[in-house]
Amino acid sequence: MAIIENPLELESGDVVRVAERPLGVLTRPSGNTGWQSWLFTVDHKRIGIMYGAFAMFFFLIGGLEALAIRLQLAVPNGKILSPETYNQVFTMHGVTMIFLVIMPLAAAFANYLLPLQLGARDVAFPRMNALSLWVFLAGGIFLCSSLFIGGWFENVPNGGWFNYAPNSGTLFSPTKGIDFYAIGLQILGIASLVSAINLIVTTLNMRAEGMSLMRMPVLSWMLLVVQFLLLFALPVITVALFLLMFDRLWGANFFNVEMGADPLLWQHLFWIFGHPEVYILILPSFGIISEVIPVFSRKPIFGYSFMVGSGIAIGFLGWGVWAHHMFVSGIGPISVAAFSVSTMMIAVPTGVKILNWVATMWGGRIQLTTAMLFAVGVVSMFTIGGLSGVTHAASAADTQQTDTYYIVAHFHYVIFGGALLGIFSGFYFWWPKMFGYKLNETWGKWNFWLQIVGFNLTFGPMHILGLQGMSRRIDSYDPGYGFELWNMVSSIGSFVIFAGVFIFLINVFVSKRQAEHLPPVGPDPWDARSLEWMTASPTPEHNFDTEIVIDSLDHFWHQKYGYDDDGNVVRIAYAEDVAHDGSATNVHLPSPSYWPIVLASGFPFVGYGLIYNYWLCAIGGFLIVGAIFGWVFEHPDDPDAAHGHHDDHGDDDGHDGHEVDEGTTENAEADLVTADSATDAGEASDG
Amino acid sequence: MAEAVLDHADAHDAHDAHEGHVHKTNTGMSNNKLAMWVFLGSECLLFGGLISTYLLYRHNIQDGPGPSEEFFDIPFTSASSFVLLMSSLTMVLAHSAAERGDQKRLKIWLLSTALLGSVFVSGQIYEFTVFVREGLGWSTSPFSSAFYALTGFHGVHVTIGIIMLLSTFISTLRGRMHPGNAETVEIVGLYWHFVDIVWVFIFTVIYLAA
């Protein structure tokens, strides 16, 4: 693209310097169309979309596993799955839904929205961002390949997602399943750790001018808290997984009770990670509905600083409650009492959030769009899950509830009713921003109602089953205990959920086709408040045409609305007038790179190698080390690569909504991502 | 085509000149340096988990040797610890030379830091062979597993640090380092100092508490 117009004149004898080629073999990837533009992209928006797409694929796998579980338990003495297969299926259901669905779906929103909400060009480390995505995919494929490697359902993890010792040792789990678990989760941990560092630096360093921390949208805040939780929780599970791997592969003694090892070590390490993990799953959803509810209540968020503060408080308190997962493991009355109290304390900031959402809706002009319905669904369903959580915090009651279906009911109310419904709310809310068309509201409402009814049918009865004494993780139950009715209801409910999710997928295709006959959605279809709505839909590759200067919380909303003489809120501008139209050209953007995907591809080789043949480790190690050096010696920012779209037609719709003085951009540094040299080409094409 | 390539090379050079410039960020700290600090925060929890595991299994020695003054060669490990701590000093000198743009001393100090680190790692490997010969295998007891895991993880961290130092050293030979990006040396130094500080804790917990 950048072939220069005037050939350079070389005097004879001059040495033509060949451009630097990383490692002498590969040129940079180029072009921003076709499959290459996705595989080698470093654009945070494309990475976010791919995170979402891969996670939805794993969601279908995890959903099919859930249906298999419910089919097995629909009637007494189910014969669909053998006990061994049942263990594998419920383990993979949990691991898939937590690590391959909810976490990456939250990462999808984090990647797509965080830079936009902060007014940044991209994340701090675009190539590391791509690395996170591909390592996540590599880890997901590695984990799921256990379903068929060495025969169908031969080497699948079968120790539950918590994988307690000593059951996880080679004595009780002789197949390769736990090895896949230990190594697969480590690979996924690398992805999350890289992503956490990247997004923390992005949030702390890359905010637009005037975007102080307390002007960040609540979603950005919650995502920041989540990244800190990941940062500190992941190394703990990494230690646990390493120790487990050492035990299983090389005969160490960390969990070997014959040698006097303490099986509680695993429980402590796991839950020090595992409880913050719960907040890692739920806080992004809290952030999402904190954006959705104000927009559809036509009111600002109630108690912004309390929303932020309670999110941070949840993040802190989340570190002091892990042993409530271990009340029956014999940790002693003082520990139990202390963790009981700290667990109840965490209900306080959570309650603050719920009341603030309600107060935001109170007196608002509520629009019950699908996104809003899902958000209200989160508030109500999470409240139920939170209340049953308080009953676990009371250790005496928990002793009765431990390992029963009551627990299963509880955590599905918080993870499905809280996290997943919030993510669906986010789908409906940000779909027009991501893809340029709205999802159909009629199909959307079918989607919502089927999902919420199916959800309550499935998991509501589990409270009763649990209190009746039905244990978790059993593959069948005898008739005559009073379990038949509610298990059947629950299994029917799971198919209703499936229908709801299926309708969502239909909706995506139906809406896309319908959108061809509808006018474009414009930058701000919901009359929203945060910065991502201040640019065209779908978001142009360069995000914003000019750098934005923020002067208040809900900056974009204040561009659209002001006050008249009587103090009433009045519209002072249309979104189209204040939003950027995405027409800036020649914006300097980070360049695509081969190395992230090459580096990520090395990890599964190392994983299979550790389990089956060390020579594969050598291949993986070669890929990883080679890619790291290629990466280091590749300039992060090739000045010759595709920098935005070079369209040559001028800004012909007449109005120019840029608020920032163009002159300020001339001082902008030619930075990795903050660079903005929109003026050159823009002026050239105008003239 | 040739022109395009040439253009590329020129633009690249022009850009390289810019490279060392510290761009404005909200915190005033560069992205790279902040990322290293954040990463080291995560590393604290990694070593925290390993040290806790060691403390849990310190007395669980089964039939093998245990952590005692007789078993450990404390003078030897103290000497190698001293070598590691001195490498922090040379690292500081390397950073200072980088900031002054003193290429010669930068190279000398980078190389000496890597050398001191290698002496430490060699000492550790030697120590391990002695312990194995004296009957403390990897699988001997929970203590032995925890001991090797903790010191081994630290040794791997030192080794990665040495690779980073040598890569930086090679960059200086290829003329890629200049006063503008002294920060690269500083960031490698952050990691190196962290690894040294962790050793102070490990040395205390394992050897001095024996």
Image: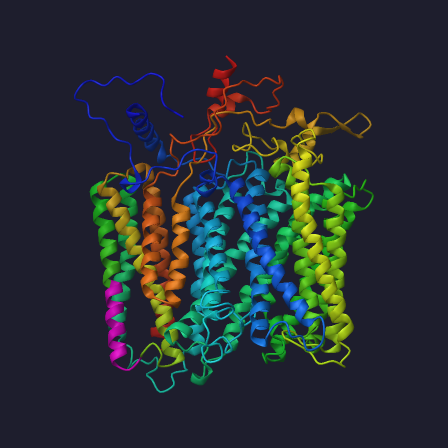
Number of on-image labels: 0
Indicate left or right for A255 with B21 as reference. right
- Farthest residue to the left: give it: A13
Question: Hey, which quadrant is residue A386 in on the image?
Answer: bottom right
Indicate left or right for A217 with A149 as reference. right
Look at the image and say whether residue A502 sits in the magenta stretch.
no
Q: What residue is at 63 percent from the left and 46 percent from the top?
A: A219
Residue A387 in view (yes/no): no
Residue A642 position, x and y percent, is 43, 31
Secondary structure mostly seen in the magenta stretch: helix
Look at the picture and state if A201 lies above or below A677: below
Residue A376 position, x and y percent, is 75, 50
- State the residue in front, A524 or A205: A524
Q: What residue is at 70 percent from the left and 26 percent from the top?
A: A574
Residue A95 position, x and y percent, is 56, 63
Look at the picture and state if A569 lies above or below A452: above
What residue span does the magenta drawing correspond to?
B120-136
- Farthest residue to the top: give it: A687
Question: Hey, which quadrant is residue A548 in on the image?
Answer: top right
Q: Look at the image and tell me in which quarter the N terminus of chain A lies.
A: top left
